[in-house]
Amino acid sequence: MKPLCTERLILRNWEDRDRALFHRINSDERVMEFFPFRRDRTTADAKMDEVRAWIEKDGYGFAAAEIAATGECIGFVGLSGTEDIDVLAPGTIEIGWRLAPKFWGKGYVTEAAEAWLAFGFETLKLNEIVSFAVAENHRSTAVMKRLGMRADPSADFDHPAVPDSHPHLKRHVMYRLSHADWQERRS
């Protein structure tokens, strides 16, 4: 993938130097509060390799977010297909993020997500980008609202990958942003 640059960030593919951070964000209790699993180092390394391969193949994905001034990787923000979520329509593209807690509240996710929305609508020519989260994940839904996404309660769903042992994490709220709404918001 060709890196995307924002005012403060470089959005790029994962590198071996990012492995410790990738493991940290996938095992941290605060970051993973709304997920039914935590990854140990071995499974985090395998997942990072999988994500890196998707990005190399597709030219986009849940890409590493790096602070341009320091070179420090802070987490990921990106676009991804949702083929593994069978309750969503084929071809659905989501925008998602996960940052280390010390970088929360600084506007990095919104800044990076704006760049990914532009990439999705201008380069990939998408008609719509969605985002979804556990209903109680107010930090993520606040970002969705800042991005101009609109709640679509008729599309809320129980995530099929969440096991019955975690019923409080099953229900996901759906937010959508159409290309037309994105263009209107930018003008």
Image (cartoon, rainbow, N blue to C red):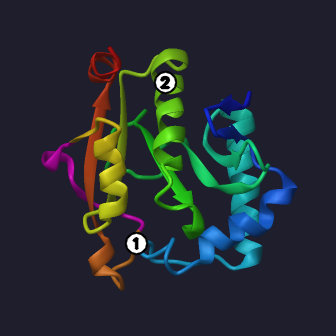
Query: Which quadrant holds residue 68?
Result: top right
Q: Secondary structure at mark 1?
A: loop
State the image coordinates of residue 58 (x, y, percent, origin top left).
Answer: 66, 32
- Residue 152: within the magenta? yes
Residue farthest to the bottom, as pictured: 165
Residue range (magenta): 151-161
- The numbered disc on residue 118 is 2
Q: Earlier in the sequence, mark 1 or mark 2?
A: 1
- Residue 67: within the magenta? no
- On the rendered structure, is 52 left or right of 185? right
Query: Which quadrant holds residue 75?
Result: bottom right
State the image coordinates of residue 167 (x, y, percent, origin top left).
Answer: 28, 79
In the picture shown, does residue 187 fall above or below 107?
A: above
At 78% from the left and 69% from the top, the residue drawn is 20
Q: Secondary structure at mark 2?
A: helix
At 61% from the left and 33% from the top, the residue drawn is 7
State the image coordinates of residue 97 (x, y, percent, origin top left).
Answer: 51, 52
Tell me the CA gap for discs 1 and 2. 27 Å
Looking at the rendered structure, the kind of residue marked 2 is Ala
Residue 8 appears in the rendering: yes
Residue bearing mark 1: 34
State the image coordinates of residue 51 (x, y, percent, origin top left).
Answer: 68, 50
**How packed is label 1: few (under 14 Cα within 10 Å), some, or many (20 or more)?**
some
Instruction: For marks 1 and 2, give the one nearer the viewer.
Output: 2
Q: Are marks 1 and 2 in contact (CB under 8 Å)?
A: no
Quadrant of the rendering where the C terminus is positioned: top left
Quadrant of the rendering where the N terminus is positioned: top right
Q: Nearer the viewer, residue 153 or 89?
A: 153
